[in-house]
Every structure is written in C-alpha cells, then in structure tokens.
Amino acid sequence: MKDNDFDIVIVGGGAVGITLALELDRLDYRVAVIERFQPTFSSSSPERVIALNYGSRCHLERLGVWDAVASQGVGDIRHIVVGESGNVGRVDLDAADGLGFAPNMQELGYVVEMGLLLQPMYELIASSSVELFSGATVQQFVVTDNGVELELQSAGQSTHLKAALLVGADGTHSQIRQMAGIGLFGWDYNRFGLVASVSCEKGHNDTAHECFRRSGPLAFLPLADDRFSIVWAAAPAEASQLLSMSDETFISALQRAAGDTTIDQIGNILSTSPRASYPLELSIAKQYAKPRIALVGNAAHTIHPVAGQGMNLGFRDVVSLVEMLDGELAHSDPGQPIIMQGYAEKRRADVMAVAGFTESMSHLFGSEVPGVKWLRGMGLEKLPLAPTLSGLLLKQASGVGQITPQRLEV
C-alpha cells in the first residue's frame, strides 16, 4: 500500500472525528484524520463546555479516555430540575431512580470543557497508527467506483490521498457535505445561545436546572469548581442587549429570567465570566451517507441545545458506523453502498427522535396560546406521578435508552 493510500479518511479532528479514528484504528483500518487547525486544549472564558450523558461516558470509558478526562475535573449531573419561570409544577430527575435499568449509573451526565476532553484523545492518537494531517484543508475530492481521491493544501503545498471511504466530521457547516452535494432540511430559530459561567451563593449540588421561558430555555449546567455554565436562548435584540450589559446589570437580568424557584435553590448569582453567543439552528442532512461518503456529528445533524444532546448524538453516530465497519465484508471495502446504506438506516430513527423531542419542547414552552401555560404547569406537576413517562424521560436524559445493555457495563 502506498504511503498516502488509506482505508478511511476522516475530515474533522473534533471529539467525534477523533473518537471515530481511535475506534477504527482498533479495527485495524488504516486511518487518516484531516484537521483544518492545529489542536489546542487551552481553557477559555467563558469555558467552551459540552454536556455528556451517562451513555457517552460509557462509550468513552470503553475507549480508554474517560479516566483521564475525569481526573482533570468534570461537573457531575446527579439531578436535573425542569421548570418554567412563573409557573407551577416542576420535574425532578435523579440518577438514583435509574439504577433499575443502569445499575452502575451514579450520574445522569457530565459537563466537560472541550479541551479537557480532546487532550487525552489526541494523546491516544499520538500513540496509535492514525496519521494526522493538522493545518490542512481539502481542496477537492473525486469519488470513483473504487474509492475517493483527495487533494489537500497545507503550508502552501499539495498532498494527494486515496481512501475507500471518506467521512465528514467537520461540523455544522461541513465542507465535505457541501462538496458531496448533500442538502439539508431545517431552519434558523432566530435565536442566539448566550453562554457564560456564573458563581452562586449555594453552589450547584450536582444539579442541572432547565428553566423554560417564552423566548427560549435557560440552562444552568454544573461545572467542576461549583460554578454553573449557562446557556440562555434569546431573540437577537435581547441577546445583543445581554452581551452589552455591565456584569451587575446582566446578573440582575439573569436572576429575573431564572425565576424565584431556581434562585431559591442556587442562591443569588454572585459573579459572571465574560459572555459569548452563537446562532441556534436546526439542520439535518437529507442523506447521512452516499457510496464512499458518510457524515457524523454536526456534519449530519445540528439540533437545538434545549436537551444537551448534540455531542451525545454524534458519539452514537460513531458507535453505529463502527458497528457497520466491524466485519469481514466491510474490511474488504468499507465504502461500498451496502455498508453506507446500513449506517444511514441505523441513524435515521435516533436522529429524528431526538430532533423531534427537542423541537416539541421548544415549541411547547414557546407557545402563547391562551391556556397552554396552565396546561404546561399541570403537566410538570403531574409528570412525577406517571412513572412510565418519568422513566422514559430519565432514559432520554441519561442516554441509556439508546444503547445496548452491554455498552452500559463500565
């Protein structure tokens, strides 16, 4: 095999792309990863964090990176409180209630700084057979019956690669998806997600709070140092105002938005980091795969952050693709149509279910129809009395409902 001939080339060196590379290396594929930027693991302010559920933790533990991630500090989510500012009723989810279907589960999820997640992954990559092309971009690629031929540009020089399968793991605005002619369906929410880190009088007590408001949800996610990372969905004009406020004025606005019930639990907000924002959108690829090409992570689907499921959905893409590539047929030709169609079929139901759930939550709590707010309050108040429905919500939040029992053994 020539030096630049690979079985699989992955474009995108984020958490999903690197996880996929590590999994495929263990299956003895010859893998290359192309990443536009040089990897960096430094912290930022506000911290760039992601929410991982227990199902994703099990995946990372099997991969051999979780202990290194956890040793650097993660925010544990043992409880989730869901409510609506100014409305009666709330839903409390507790990890202890899930022991019947996940005996080892002590947390529903975790809040992790992106750099702390990526660093141990890249350390594993360095000791693997995966070839990493950092600071490189794909100029063009051509799909043939036998594979994919790519031209890379790096430091002013061109490099040509060949592969049987090309995987786009390059994010929401995926270059690979666009170059492959795969369209999207979805929409812009006309909302921005404002992020910051805040400290509160009472700390977080391993509890995440989801506060629904008419203009969008406000989430408080526990960090390792007893602060919260917040994600506040706001209309463009409101988001612009929030970004330009003084810290004192912003804290006052945040406390009003959170509502008395949440503030009673976390105490007054004492300080805030600098703020940042990003646009919220729903975009789902019309095809998750074509012959010789597969999409994973945000390249395949970007959803509303209301339930914190984006990265978890991407890791389940990895699991499904690896399952399709783990076999004699796939090793003979990993990009063949039957493998790609099998992967797409595996992912379709899960992606649509999660997207549908986040959309329904967003629309339900954004409705201004008379009487709907009262019904929402009654629903939140009565949900704990419906154990079957509560159990389904708990499985969704923890991610254990979408993976096999064998993968929960950590």
Image: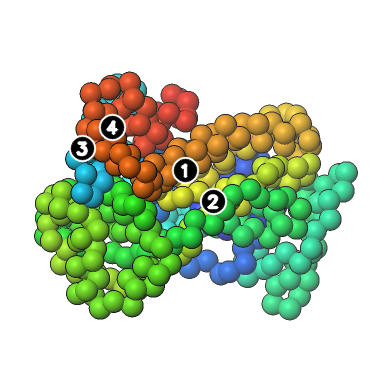
- The residue at 69%/42% (across/down) is 287
Give neighbour class at mark 1: few <14, some 14-19, many 20+ (Cα, 10 Å). some
For disc 4, the marked residue is: 379
Whichever of labels 1 and 4 marks the residue nearer the N terminus, that label is 1
From the image, state whether disc 3 or disc 2 is nearer to you.
3
Q: Which mark is residue 282?
A: 2
Toward the viewer: 341 or 123? 341
User: Could you give the CA–CA distance between mark 1 and mark 4, rounded to whole angstroms?
Assistant: 17 Å
Q: Secondary structure under badge 2?
A: strand
Q: Secondary structure under badge 1?
A: helix
User: Could you give the CA–CA distance between mark 4 and mark 2, rounded to whole angstroms?
Assistant: 26 Å
The answer to whether any part of residue 22 appears in the image is no
Whichever of labels 2 and 1 marks the residue nearer the N terminus, that label is 2
Proximity of marks 3 and 4: CB atoms separated by less than 8 Å = yes
For disc 1, the marked residue is: 359
Left or right for 237, reference 165: left
User: Could you give the CA–CA distance between mark 3 and mark 1, rounded to whole angstroms?
Assistant: 21 Å
Proximity of marks 3 and 1: CB atoms separated by less than 8 Å = no
Question: What amino acid type is highlighted by mark number 1?
Answer: Glu
- The residue at 49%/56% (across/down) is 189
Whichever of labels 3 and 1 marks the residue nearer the N terminus, that label is 3
